[in-house]
Image (cartoon, rainbow, N blue to C red):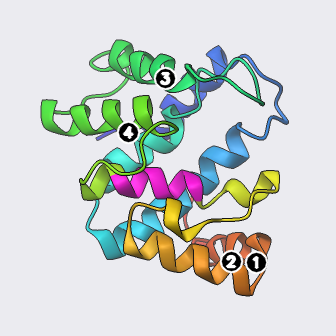
Amino acid sequence: MIDFAFLKSKIKEQWRLSAHSVHGEDHWHQVMRNGLFLSKKTGADETVVKLFALFHDSCRLDDLYDGEHGSRSADLAEKWRGVYYELDDGRFRKLYHACRYHTHEHSAGDATIDTCYDADRLDLGRVGFILDPERFATPYGKKLAVLSHQVSPDQVRDFLLEYFREKDF
């Protein structure tokens, strides 16, 4: 069993950006909510999705452009595997791939990895991006992106927050 609260505390210890970063803890929580919501439809591995939410932006050096943050984050996940959390080889390969390529790859063709990608993309509205359904990897991510054109991205985010109100991440 992974202690996600402990793991999050370790990630926060090595975090280099401000506490108010658009890629920080609030974003990690939203990506986790998005991913768990999508997982109900895609059948994605929820443990990998939750780990992705914590790790994917964990090694950013800049809030604007940091093209190598995914690679650094994947490497951190690898370094901490067996130290702060356990994950079998197959699931770890998915986590590593999702972290490493989440900004460079449209789709991996794997439900878990693609759910991770869409969980992150669904939160792009927080920085003013209009969600483009064609850039989503899962049919359910695409549907939520279309929905964001009918309501604001903040309303999609609020819906997901309400959906998971009882959950503690």
Regarding residue 4, the answer to whether it shows in the image is yes
Give the distance between the C-alpha atoms of the residues marked 1 and 3, in whole angstroms: 29 Å
What residue is rendered at 61% in x and 45% in y? Answer: 28
Residue at mark 1: 155
What residue is rendered at 32% in x and 33% in y? Answer: 97
In the rendered image, residue 134, in percent from the top left (x then y), is placed at: 50, 66
The answer to whether the residues at label 3 and label 4 have Cβ atoms under 8 Å apart is no
Residue 110 vs residue 167: left or right?
Answer: left
- N-terminal of the pair, mark 3 or mark 2, is 3
- N-terminal of the pair, mark 1 or mark 4, is 4
What residue is rendered at 26% in x and 67% in y? Answer: 43
Query: Residue most toward the front?
Result: 134
Residue at mark 4: 98
The answer to whether the residues at label 2 and label 1 have Cβ atoms under 8 Å apart is yes
- N-terminal of the pair, mark 4 or mark 2, is 4
Q: SS of the residue at dot 3?
A: helix
Q: Residue 120 colored magenta? A: yes
Kind of residue indicated by mark 4: Ala
In the rendered image, residue 68, in percent from the top left (x then y), is placed at: 55, 19
Residue at mark 3: 73
The residue range painted magenta reads 114-121
Residue 29 vs residue 108: left or right?
Answer: right
Between residues 74 and 9, which one lies in front from this camera angle? 74
* Residue 81 quadrant: top left
Kind of residue indicated by mark 3: Ser
Kind of residue indicated by mark 1: Gln
Give the distance between the C-alpha atoms of the residues marked 3 and 4, in whole angstroms: 10 Å
- N-terminal of the pair, mark 1 or mark 3, is 3
